[in-house]
Amino acid sequence: MNAIPNPSRRHFLKTSAVIGGGLVIAFVIPGAKRFASAAPAAAGAGGFAPNAFLRVGNDDSVTVLIAHSEMGQGIWTALPMLIAEELDADWSKVRVEHAPAAPAYAHAVYGMQMTGGSSSTWSEFDRYRQAGAAARNLLLQAAAARTNLPIDQLRTENGEVVAGAERIRYGALADDAGKLTAPDPETLTLKDPSKWKFIGKDTRRLDTPEKITGRAQFGMDVQFPGLLTAVVARAPVFGAKVKSFDDAAARTIPGVRNVVQVPSGVAVVADHYWAAKLGRDALKVDWDLGEGASLDSATMREELARLAATPGTPSAHAGDVGAALPTAAKIVAAVYAVPYLAHAPMEPLNCTVKIGDGLCEIWTGTQFQTLDQMVAAKILGMKPEQVQIHTMFLGGGFGRRATPTSDFVSEAVQVAKAAKAPVKTVWSREDDIHGGYYRPAYVHDVRIGIDAQGMPFAWQHGIAGQSIAADSPFEGAMIKNGIDATSVEGVFDSPYLKEIPNHHVSLHSPKRPIPVLWWRSVGHSHTGFVMESLIDELAHAAGKDPLEYRRQLLKNHPRHLGVLNLAAEKAGWGTPLAQGHARGIAVHESFGSYVAQVADVSMTEDRRIRVHSMVCAVDCGIAVNPETIRAQLESGVAFGLSAALHGKLSFKEGRVQESNFHDYPVLRLGEMPQVQVHIVPSTEKPGGIGETGVPPVAPAVANAVFALTGQRLRELPLQLSASPSKA
């Protein structure tokens, strides 16, 4: 996720934020059902646009404008399904476009145009259906006027209005419908779920043909006459500043057109990428390194461990843990740690900027259109509406393209402004892995008291790690009483703690110059690992089966229990496995959805972990497109295993040591397990799906490793010691 915090806890309500020294943004949530807007979806020649989210052409085409960014999560199909459902559209006529950056496309909860927090489908579930229903209403009115029949004698079907024996194509009614006044969406009656034809049905993705044929346009694909390419020499350590630079050698490289200093470093502008890269290689830059040059992974880990073991800012509290712990039959004490992680999307960061008379055009794959538009306008002294953002397909985002500073977009605007030419600024993968932003490193220090029956009754939990929201435009909305909820989500609101009479969760958020950001599943990426590993530790200490132990703890949490039981059943929990194999289980709720996973693992001769299969059960409420849901769970397994088995950034003398996929590997094809996905039928409101498959992966694998070897792994990435030892 790509990833913005769960809106049930953190709303961006009327929050003022200062960006780039003076740009004030007020986040105001529009009505969740507000969608009318004349201009953005203008029909052009022929057809009509009843609202900002669709237009119907005279050729019967239905073009859906997507307010969010498609980065592989499947909204290019799921959101049109919502409109098609209420419109009774002919699916073969449905087309999709990314919407422009405009107020009409502000997120129905967050109040700005953005994509994150696994929120696209649930946030648009009503709004897009209402948009389709409004268009259908206008088409019926037009048909009623043409046939002189009352509307209640007409019906719609597969892109046509049926009037007795006559069938009238939507395209033939488009002009007449366009002359009518759009109905108030609040007056529309949406379909009963029993009549759904699209929602809940496996639907092939509309963007697949585009991507297979190469027609899909990503940011890196943007090209037009006169466009130059730039790469930037950025600070080797965080917070460093340019003291001086010598560009004489760079300017001798064939194809280099210009060398300009920008706030982030020194940009080499050239005819093409290779010339720009060679020019940057030839630059001589003298840096004032600053305090960031002292950053060291071992030292930072020690600091986090020390903080986590001391009282911090309270996040959740009940009873008296201090008095309860000494009375425990047994105390389970553990320290867990996770490292900094890069997002490493397959398509490196890039942004194309063209500045003209009173207009700036930007082509990029972004998750934060509104912020990017405002930041660009501030840099150029323009109004936001003078900045046009063309959202391209994103070759992966995972939160990296949703930066509160609009870092790669603002930098590209600065480069184009300084170069006085249209420029595509390109980051190499090394640039991004070295240049932030990252999932923060965390340490958890936990002491749990269990009674004579092996059940927990006292839980003390300290967490230490950087705050994502601190010093960002979202600090005022996201940090409450000193707590950044993204640091503790999955712990303070855990269903397990709700059943424990004495518990205390506290947080330390040390300041560091390392830029940190939401990373797919955000805080759940570490809290899921810790909590589900701890529950396994408790089950072992109690001498109980991990599945049965969870069932007992979750007896009052039916949706957790539902996915837990389904995953265990489908995985054959308790049945014999092949020699040298073991199973581990985990269950976690995030972004309004519930996921349980069972991992089947073995160990290679050189003591590497091999994951053979992962059985997933998910309850995400109403499943709009089950095909996409299965794909996202499979994707979550791949992403989660990349972090669980490989992911780690290390710092030495302020510099990130890893650079590309050879030393910051993602899961290889040969490592990918078989994945089964089972969806719990549900009538609950939709939850998120893009991120919720990641948190249970690492603990399911770690728990299986313990069952196999007796070695309890409390640090990511998971690595077995040279010889087994009991925890």
Image: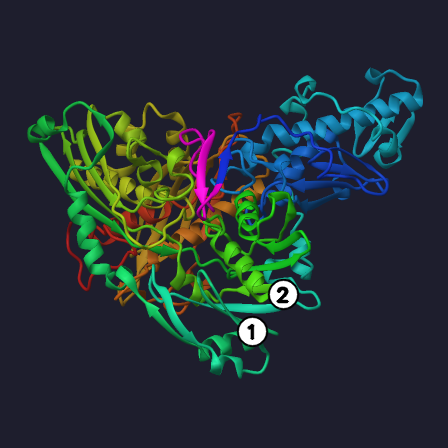
Which tag, 2 or 1, sits closer to the chain's start?
1
What residue is rendered at 46% in x and 44% in y?
Answer: 22
What residue is rendered at 45% in x and 77% in y?
Answer: 281
What residue is rendered at 44% in x and 38% in y?
Answer: 17
Where does label 2 land, which residue?
421
Which of the 4 image quadrants contains residue 355?
bottom right
**Colour theme:** rainbow
Number of numbered labels in the structure image: 2
Q: Residues within 10 Å of mark 2 (few under 14, many from 20)?
A: some
Do the residues under discs 2 and 1 have CB atoms within 8 angstroms? yes
Callout 2: SS: loop
Residue bounds of the magenta highlight: 1-23
The secondary structure that most of the magenta stretch takes on is loop
Where does label 1 land, which residue?
258
Is residue 539 found left or right of 42 in the rendered image?
left
Q: CA distance from mark 2 to mark 1?
A: 10 Å
> Of the residues shown, which amino acid type is indicated by label 2?
Ala
Q: Is residue 665 visible?
A: no
Is residue 450 found left or right of 529 in the rendered image?
left
